[in-house]
Image (tube, rainbow, N blue to C red):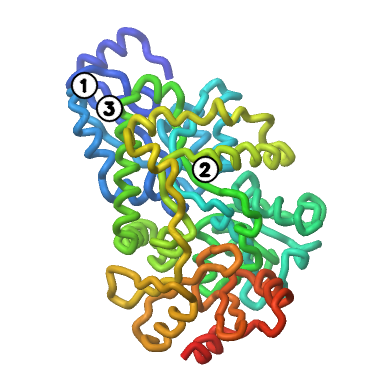
Amino acid sequence: MKRTAVATAAALLLAPLTACGGNAAAGGAGSTVTVTVGYQSKTINTVTAGTLLRSLGYFEKELNSLGDGRTYKVDWQDYATGAPITAQMTAGKIDIGSMGDFPLLINAARGKQLNRPTRLVSVTGYNLRGGLNTIVTAPDSKLTSLKDLKGKKVSTSVGSAADGTLVRALQRSGIDPNDGVEKLNQQPAVGASALAAGSTDALSQFVAWPGLLAYQGKAKALYDGAQLNLPTFHGVTAREDFAKKSPAVLKAFLKAQAEATDYLNAHPVTAAENVAKATGLPAEVVYLYNGAHGISTFDPAVKPQLVSALKQDVSVLKAAKLTGDVDVDAFVDDQYVKKALGASYAKQLAATPPAAASEAWPEGAEETKAFKSPAELLRYVVAHRDGIRAAYVPDATTGTVWFADKAVWVADGDQFLPFVAPATAQAYVSAHGGSRVITYADALERAA
């Protein structure tokens, strides 16, 4: 609502200026400035720009150290998906937001369309093969491969990275993503309820829903998104006008994000506990994605392979009529994160994910134990059956980490090979004579 010049002048005389959603650069010394950040607490691939960052207080600390005479306040706004964050950004009410790759493209398209341009300024977490998205079915489902979905009901969130995974996976399996399945456009929580109620045959969702449902015994994996071998990631977007008017504030945010990333990488178990406390998610699920060898790798650098993947994503959104062409090169703006990270940016840009490893999380431990092979992990679990909080293994084909007791196991001679989904396990068995699928209990017994 527009105010008259008299009312504006009176307000300035009566109270210090409070800036919110677009006015973060307004006001001089002694003014109060509010910076509004939109995040998704339960989308735990964004924690270094949201849940974890908020709990650590690093952004507020960086703002207080600016020394410009202003008082800064951060308004943290939590959302379930990226769509409402984009709506608030294009309305000038959110300054900085974090979301997945497909929502980022919609963010770019809506910003341009409404003359409220936004820019991708950093990355939170990524998986170079696409393992952040998974298609799951009910625990008692008879479906064993993606081809079994033909003619079935599948719940997903249209416009999300999980929907992108579903579309591409169906296409590779020879199923028309528009006519070959009955797609239900639902929020993740609604889709999870639909799967439990039997009103959908499968659910394609992003972190942390597949891992959560598997951990709770409410779902099992049907398709590992890493089979696509296409990078998926989440990132930070900022309004262009905010970035230009308040570069010091944006730099402070990105410095704080980098500090939160360092904290997560140095203290993965503690970070998982912090995020679990803030979100209500089980820490074991958080660690599946955000752990030392988790599905996600955290690094704020805007890597070329992620930008390349973003360009490939445009065609999927265009086919769904969710966007037109998106100028990805114009949307990506890493100048701010380069300034925030300084000399370390080049090193982080070249950094690669840690090598795959099996891990056991002992009860009461502040650190996990890593093992070079799944067989070593199995032997450790056998020797400490009553003292294991969680055990994790990387898929033998894709490297995607999964819960050891939820994985599909294959015995091949003296090797024990875990897989996220039954189809990949069966593909291995078909190609390796003498190997066969066994239960987790059998794997433990044989390893002992």
Helix or strand or loop: what does disc 3 sit on? Answer: strand
Helix or strand or loop: what does disc 2 sit on? Answer: loop
The residue wearing badge 3 is: 33
Q: Amino acid at mark 3?
A: Val
The residue wearing badge 1 is: 15
Helix or strand or loop: what does disc 1 sit on? Answer: loop
Left or right: residue 85 versus residue 430 is left
The residue wearing badge 2 is: 82
The quadrant the N terminus occupies is top left
Where is residue 440 shown, x and y percent of the image?
54, 83
Residue 29 appearing in the image? yes
Q: Earlier in the sequence, mark 3 or mark 2?
A: 3
Q: Image quarter for residue 193?
A: bottom right
Q: Amino acid at mark 2?
A: Gly
Q: Earlier in the sequence, mark 1 or mark 3?
A: 1
Where is residue 361 shown, x and y percent of the image?
36, 73
Q: Amino acid at mark 1?
A: Ala
User: Marks 3 and 2, Cα distance to the nearest angstrom?
Assistant: 25 Å
